[in-house]
Image (cartoon, rainbow, N blue to C red):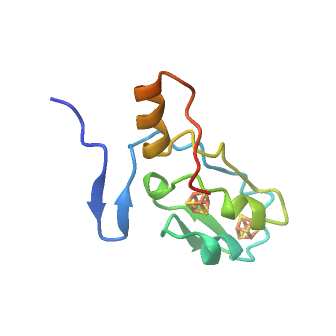
């Protein structure tokens, strides 16, 4: 049986599970919470003066959090885990490239 591409959750649409490239270096985080504010999905949640990646499968790899993090604590490869980009790459037999952000 094939796995469902998208899953409706309480917080929104979950993209393909376990493929996001989003990473957090908690040692660099200053706890400003800007990533929480700019992220269109509830990916992050505050944790002990910092943040944690709470729902990684909700990340659509738009890059907004990375662009707004002054500490360089976040990284993501835009579009690598974006379902639309992956489907397009399958259809066109090309590398995933996201136009969402
Ligand atoms: S924007 Fe960067 S420094 Fe601010 S809370 Fe998020 S990860 Fe930490
Ligand atoms: S890349 Fe976009 S969707 Fe993913 S955590 Fe950052 S702001 Fe949220």
Measuring from the top left, give residue 17's x and y in whole percent: 38, 43
Q: Nearer the viewer, residue 57 or 63?
A: 63
Name the residue: 84% across, 62% down.
71
Q: Nearer the viewer, residue 72 or 60?
A: 60
Q: In which image quadrant can residue 55 be found?
A: bottom left
Q: Nearer the viewer, residue 23 or 58?
A: 58
Residue sticking out furthest to the top: 93
Left or right of 6, for residue 85: right
Measuring from the top left, give residue 36's x and y in whole percent: 61, 73
Looking at the image, how many numbered discs can be counted on the residues?
A: 0
Image position of 84 with respect to 68: above or below: above
Measuring from the top left, give residue 68's x and y in whole percent: 76, 67
Ligand 2's quadrant: bottom right
Residue sticking out furthest to the left: 1
Image position of 37 with respect to 8: above or below: below
Quadrant that contains the C terminus:
bottom right
Q: In which image quadrant can residue 1 be found?
A: top left
Name the residue: 76% across, 61% down.
67
Measuring from the top left, give residue 56's x and y in whole percent: 49, 53
Image position of 69 with respect to 24: above or below: below
Image position of 59 with respect to 90: above or below: below
Left or right of 19, for residue 65: right
Name the residue: 51% across, 42% down.
81
Name the residue: 27% across, 61% down.
8
Left or right of 77, for residue 95: left
């Amino acid at each position: 049986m094939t796995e469902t591409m998208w899953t409706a959750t309480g917080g929104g649409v979950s993209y393909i599970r376990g493929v996001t490239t989003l990473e957090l270096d908690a040692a660099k985080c200053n706890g400003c919470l800007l990533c929480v504010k700019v992220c269109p999905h509830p990916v992050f949640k505050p944790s002990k003066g910092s943040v944690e990646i709470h729902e990684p499968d909700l990340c659509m790899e738009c890059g907004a959090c990375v662009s707004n993090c002054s500490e360089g604590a976040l990284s993501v490869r835009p579009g690598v885990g974006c379902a639309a980009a992956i489907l397009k790459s399958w259809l066109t037999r090309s590398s995933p490239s996201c136009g969402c952000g």
